[in-house]
């Protein structure tokens, strides 16, 4: 590695928002060409810190020095000119413009051009892609790209701005493991060119794979700043939460007389699912994992009626059923907690209560088809209590809740409809570690009461701690079945990765 | 001690009142204040003509049909859409009903004949409104055309059908329908009864039925609505069908009131209906707003129109000043809503 | 390189094919009336004003907004310009100084500049509400549509100007770029104002394609948030957009009044839907980010072709609106259905 010369020095930063201290005296140094990981739960202050480095927020106190220059009032443009580039989770690309223009536009903009030089745009874009040794069709519109290709476009764009430090916010969330490996190779190339990488992630196994140094924030304070060599996942998790977690398993023994709740035979759907067959017993928690694009989400959607089956058979309680629409799924008492809770799961501006009873509304009607306010009130109170949703008033909008409590509302919505089968797609994405284990407890207790539960996830610790059985998918097929009691996290990770290599 | 405390309490209540008026939920209160202020203003300026029973009655007749159309626009706006074809639908309904009445009621027709003609004309009119609304719903919900474009297209289409039928001329209704447009029941004008009934029924539907509940949720987040098992397609089709039915009602009221129908009647009604809906607190992006607010906005607007007319009576083109004032009012309301929204975040 | 499939499924191609097929059908039904140079020039002439308006609407749609107030701006600009020039006697003053031809040309130029200036001011009012407060564009421009027209009719006037029209504007309607007399046919005249449409088109094309401002308009329409982060000045761009649309509307208004040789304050308002429809038919998306100058021109041509040729093929004029309405619905349904298909396969 290059000599340890600091590129960015953040000293004693404090940031207050309307009386809330988001950062309390945090100091961070990033050296040239260094790969650094920033970890922390939601609300730990990591996004605030990034925004301060990017010049978007002004710190309440403390200083930021980039490349030896200390800024009194760092504006976004100063930060960019000093060589700091932030790649946000949504990449900030223009879907309607071409790859070349997306890559070169910011540079044209910062050169304060009045006119567009298309020849230069194409040339510059090609050069930037050569620098990270990838090839993308320059004239394709970005909306036609895959997520990984969009990310590469965003990286190429950052390079054109003479980036010395690239900050990536949760860059691997939407990538397949194969693509993650490719991304890591690109990062290594950037490092070799002396560009520092600040990687913000909650996937601890990846953190350890890529980072030379790990910084952990908790409640606005820096609690760990150490080289990655001596660290393991459990230690980082401990620093993030301040709690120790036991490695527990969900014990499940089917009753002797029990019959499968759900049986799927040779299901084919959407050209993506091929000959899927499995069984789900009442009380079982079945994990379904695989890389992005392996078909795990498609399987969830097929069972929920959004991607109707082309062939094959779905049986519930031994009887064949047709699931061609969400309404069919609901009629068969199947519930679905979607992956993207904010856009697919919740009505953010509506009351918590309204969100909970949306599936239950038919049962709250009297003989005349009128909603009974008392019955509605009772339902809402029941679920707020049962799932311990922390709120002063269920009449408040859902947006007033924390991520974990919002997810409880989504689960309550489905529980109110009294499902027999509950499908959870990424049930704890974006939920902090503390709430995560509470959500897992809720899921387990539902299963103990006889519900059949499917969890689609690539969060391996989550699968290990909640599921009794795990199916591994690849290219739309189930390739392996594991009993959770027979394996450990490392083995499952390895299996997932080996699938990536053969894919 | 007591005397020292009293001002404190007083200060608190005024503070709370301002707070309430400017809060997000204060829209109905704000509109009520505007209504009262406008009434007071014009009653002072034209104390001879404005605060009279006669004037109130004439305002009611003018406002009711626009109010009914505004209800349709409000409903579609609650789902995040809009219905620009309301007035074209209303005119088409009026034209068809009028044509049927003219054809079926010859000179010196008996009561039975008139009654039969009325039943046929009203049924055809209602059905037409329903079909127009269903077609809008089909285009928006099934085909997936943005509501602005879909209803803009049907606006031209429905107007075109009306033109094709009438050749652009006016159709007359006979006296038979006059009761709907000009009649009274125990001293209350029939159009007002129809407007209030429609508002009441729709408010009830929106607040207390499954359909209403789903309209609000769909307007808030269509994707989450879909994933929650709400049949978005059906909810949208029903909403636009309801809007079509309201247009039919408005068309029949107009036909009864002015005893004529033509494709160019009520050129500014679409704007007015949108203005009333937005003024009444319906969120143009969908998901929030109450019909009570829409009713208050209607009253405020009618006071303003009539009041201005009376104040500017001597000037030519007072009607055009009204158009100007409406436009200005819409912009001011948008600004006010902007500041209130900003204040509450 | 775009392949064959991409070209064929492009909106421009579809519209062009529709125009060609429609022309062939009309030619078969009534070759004498349709297939003449005079008729072609007539269609072109009636597309000039719509075309100028359409270029403005295109820019607004690309930026993700909508403007329904431009007809009010156009008629406001036209009527006030004529009133100002008549009351100040500008045309007469010019005639006193310059030789006749020059004076008429200058008279028209003054009218055009005055119209553009008035359009600019009214456009700035739209821009103020939209850019400064980020209010919904449809509702704002519905409001200004009425405010502008109400102001015009109440404060400026309601009488139709005919004799008061500056002679320079009248001369425009009589000046032809091309005048061809084919044997045994009516003389075909192509009005000079087609050059104004051409200039506007080239200007807008250059603006959208080769200036950073144009790319900013696409960027804002594609993803507003990303545009702000990239450092585009959204507020300034929006000010530009609505002011520019105002200027185009003002110019369109003057050309309209010149070609019709009158200034009627009740004119133009009501055509907003036809113009928006033409632009959408030409492939611009109402949700922003998409739209081309060529597509817009084709859309305008399609709309004028249909509305000016229905009589030619024996469809009674009362049915015209039915056909236009149906055409618009089909035109906007096709991209909607295509969009749906593009979205459904990837369920997530």
Image (cartoon, coloured by chain):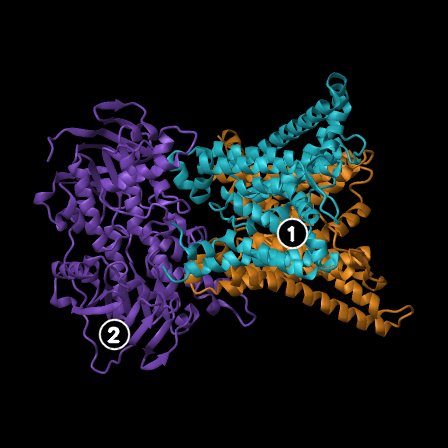
Residue located 30% across and 31% down the image: A80
Left/right placement of residue A170 relative to residue B273 reads: left
Chain C: what color? cyan
Q: Which chain is purple?
A: A
Residue beneath label 2, please? Answer: A278
Marks 1 and 2 on same chain: no
Chain B: what color? orange
The crowding category of the residue bearing disc 1, from other C-alpha atoms within 10 Å (few below 14, some 14 to 19, many at least 20), is: many
Of residues B52 and A491, the one drawn nearer to the viewer in this rendering: A491
C-alpha gap between disc 1 and disc 2 = 61 Å
Q: Quadrant of residue A194?
A: top left
Q: Quadrant of residue A60?
A: top left
Dot in front, 1 or 2: 1
Left/right placement of residue B322 relative to residue A266 reads: right
Numbered mark located on residue C305 in the image:
1
Name the spot of residue B317 as percent of width and height, x first. Answer: 79, 37
Could you tell me if residue B169 is visible in this image? yes
Name the spot of residue B206 as percent of width and height, x first. Answer: 56, 59
Residue located 52% across and 41% down the image: B23
Name the spot of residue A395 as percent of width and height, x first. Answer: 45, 53
Of residues C106 and B15, the one drawn nearer to the viewer in this rendering: C106
């Amino acid at each position: 590695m290059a000599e340890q010369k600091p590129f960015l020095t953040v000293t004693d930063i404090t940031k207050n928002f309307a009386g809330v201290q988001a950062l309390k005296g945090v100091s961070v140094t990033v050296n040239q060409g260094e790969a650094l990981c920033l970890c922390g739960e939601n609300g730990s202050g990591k996004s605030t810190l990034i925004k301060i480095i990017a010049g978007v927020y002004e710190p309440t106190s403390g200083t930021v020095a980039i490349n030896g220059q200390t800024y009194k009032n760092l504006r976004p443009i100063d930060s960019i000119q000093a060589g700091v580039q932030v790649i946000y989770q949504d990449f900030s690309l223009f879907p309607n413009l071409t790859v070349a223009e997306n890559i070169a536009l910011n540079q044209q903009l910062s050169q304060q051009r009045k006119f567009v030089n298309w020849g230069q745009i194409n040339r510059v874009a090609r050069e930037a892609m050569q620098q990270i040794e990838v090839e993308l069709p320059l004239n394709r519109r970005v909306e036609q790209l895959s997520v990984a290709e969009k990310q590469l476009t965003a990286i190429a764009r950052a390079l054109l701005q003479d980036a010395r430090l690239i900050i990536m916010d949760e860059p691997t969330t939407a990538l397949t493991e194969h693509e993650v490996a490719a991304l890591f190779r690109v990062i290594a190339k950037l490092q070799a060119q002396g560009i520092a990488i600040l990687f913000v992630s909650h996937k601890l196994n990846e953190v350890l794979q890529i980072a030379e140094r790990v910084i952990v924030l908790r409640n606005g304070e820096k609690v760990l700043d150490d080289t990655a060599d001596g660290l393991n996942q459990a230690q980082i998790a401990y620093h993030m939460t301040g709690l120790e977690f036991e490695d527990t398993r969900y014990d499940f023994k089917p009753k002797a007389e029990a019959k499968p709740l759900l049986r799927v035979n040779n299901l084919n759907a959407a050209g993506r699912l091929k000959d899927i067959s499995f069984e789900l017993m009442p009380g079982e928690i079945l994990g379904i994992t695989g890389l992005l694009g392996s078909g795990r989400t498609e399987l969830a959607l097929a069972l929920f009626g959004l991607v109707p089956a082309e062939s094959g058979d779905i049986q519930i309680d031994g009887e064949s059923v047709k699931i061609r629409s969400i309404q069919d799924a609901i009629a068969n008492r199947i519930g679905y907690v979607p992956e993207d809770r904010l856009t697919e799961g919740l009505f953010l501006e509506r009351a918590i209560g309204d969100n909970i009873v949306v599936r239950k509304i038919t049962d709250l009607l009297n003989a005349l088809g009128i909603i009974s306010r008392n019955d509605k009130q009772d339902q809402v109170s029941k679920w707020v209590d049962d799932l311990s949703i922390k709120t002063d008033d269920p009449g408040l909008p859902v947006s007033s809740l924390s991520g974990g409590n919002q997810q409880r509302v989504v689960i309550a919505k489905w529980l109110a409809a009294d499902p027999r089968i509950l499908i959870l797609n990424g049930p704890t994405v974006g939920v902090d570690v503390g709430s995560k284990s509470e959500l897992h407890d809720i899921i387990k207790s539902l299963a103990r009461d006889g519900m059949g539960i499917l969890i689609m996830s690539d969060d391996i610790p989550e699968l290990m701690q909640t599921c009794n059985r795990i199916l591994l998918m690849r290219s739309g097929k189930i390739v392996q079945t594991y009993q959770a009691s027979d394996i450990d996290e490392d083995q499952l990770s390895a299996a997932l990765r080996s699938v990536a290599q053969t894919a | 001690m007591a005397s020292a405390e009293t001002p404190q309490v007083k200060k608190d209540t005024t503070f709370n009142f301002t707070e309430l008026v400017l809060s997000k939920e204060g829209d109905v209160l704000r509109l009520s204040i505007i209504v009262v202020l406008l009434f007071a203003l014009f009653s002072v300026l034209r104390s001879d003509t404005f605060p009279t029973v006669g004037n109130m009655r004439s305002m009611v007749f003018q406002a009711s049909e626009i109010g009914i159309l505004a209800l349709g626009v409000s409903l579609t706006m609650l789902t995040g859409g809009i219905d620009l074809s309301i007035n074209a639908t209303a005119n088409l309904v009026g034209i068809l009903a009028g044509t049927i009445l003219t054809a079926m009621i010859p000179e010196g027709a008996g009561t039975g004949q008139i009654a039969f003609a009325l039943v046929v004309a009203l049924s055809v009119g209602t059905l037409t409104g329903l079909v127009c609304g269903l077609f809008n719903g089909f285009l928006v919900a099934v085909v997936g055309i943005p509501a602005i474009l879909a209803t803009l297209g049907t606006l031209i289409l429905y107007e075109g059908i009306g033109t094709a039928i009438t050749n652009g001329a006016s159709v007359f209704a006979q006296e038979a329908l006059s009761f709907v447009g000009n009649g009274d029941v125990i001293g209350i004008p029939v159009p007002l009864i129809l407007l209030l009934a429609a508002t009441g029924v729709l408010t009830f539907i929106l607040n207390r039925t499954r359909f209403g509940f789903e309209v609000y949720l769909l307007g808030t987040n269509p994707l989450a609505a879909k994933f929650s098992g709400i049949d978005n397609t059906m909810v949208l089709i029903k909403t636009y069908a309801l809007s079509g039915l309201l247009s039919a009602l408005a068309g029949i009221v107009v036909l009864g009131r002015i005893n004529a129908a033509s494709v160019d009647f009520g050129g500014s009604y679409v704007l007015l209906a949108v203005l009333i809906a937005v003024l009444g607190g319906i969120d143009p992006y969908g998901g929030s707003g109450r019909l009570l607010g829409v009713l208050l906005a209607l009253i405020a607007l009618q006071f303003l129109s009539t009041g201005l007319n009376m104040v500017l009576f001597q000037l030519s083109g007072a009607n055009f000043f009204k158009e100007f004032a409406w436009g200005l009012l819409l912009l001011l309301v948008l600004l006010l809503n902007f500041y209130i929204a900003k204040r509450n975040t | 390189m775009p392949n064959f499939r991409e070209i064929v499924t492009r909106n421009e191609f579809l519209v062009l094919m529709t125009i060609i097929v429609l022309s062939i059908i009309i030619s078969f039904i009534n070759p004498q009336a349709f297939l003449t140079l005079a008729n072609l020039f007539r269609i072109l002439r009636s597309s000039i004003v719509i075309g100028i308006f359409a270029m403005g609407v295109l820019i607004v749609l690309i930026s993700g907004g909508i403007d329904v107030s431009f007809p009010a701006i156009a008629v406001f600009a036209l009527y006030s310009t004529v009133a100002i020039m008549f009351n100040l006697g500008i045309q007469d003053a010019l005639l006193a100084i310059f030789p006749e031809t020059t004076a008429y040309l200058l008279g028209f130029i003054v009218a055009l500049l005055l119209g553009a200036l008035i359009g600019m001011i009214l456009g700035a009012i739209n821009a103020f509400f939209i850019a400064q407060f980020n209010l919904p564009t449809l509702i704002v421009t519905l409001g200004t549509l009425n405010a502008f027209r109400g102001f015009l009719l109440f404060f400026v006037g309601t009488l139709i100007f005919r004799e008061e029209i500056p002679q320079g504007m009248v001369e425009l309607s009589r000046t032809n770029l091309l005048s061809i007399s084919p044997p045994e046919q009516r003389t075909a005249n192509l009005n000079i104002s087609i050059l104004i449409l051409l200039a506007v088109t080239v200007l807008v094309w250059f603006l959208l394609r080769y200036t950073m401002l144009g790319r900013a308009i696409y960027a804002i329409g594609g993803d507003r948030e990303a545009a702000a982060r990239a450092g585009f000045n959204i507020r300034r761009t929006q000010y530009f957009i609505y002011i520019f649309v105002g200027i185009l509307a003002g110019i369109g208004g003057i050309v309209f009044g010149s070609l019709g040789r009158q200034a009627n304050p009740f004119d133009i308002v009501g055509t907003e839907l036809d113009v928006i429809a033409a632009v959408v038919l030409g492939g611009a998306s109402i949700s922003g980010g998409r739209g081309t100058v060529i597509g817009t021109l084709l859309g305008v041509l399609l709309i004028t072709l249909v509305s000016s040729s229905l009589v030619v093929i024996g469809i009674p004029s009362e049915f015209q609106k039915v056909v236009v309405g149906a055409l618009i619905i089909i035109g906007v349904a096709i991209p909607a259905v295509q969009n749906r298909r593009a979205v459904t396969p990837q369920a997530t």
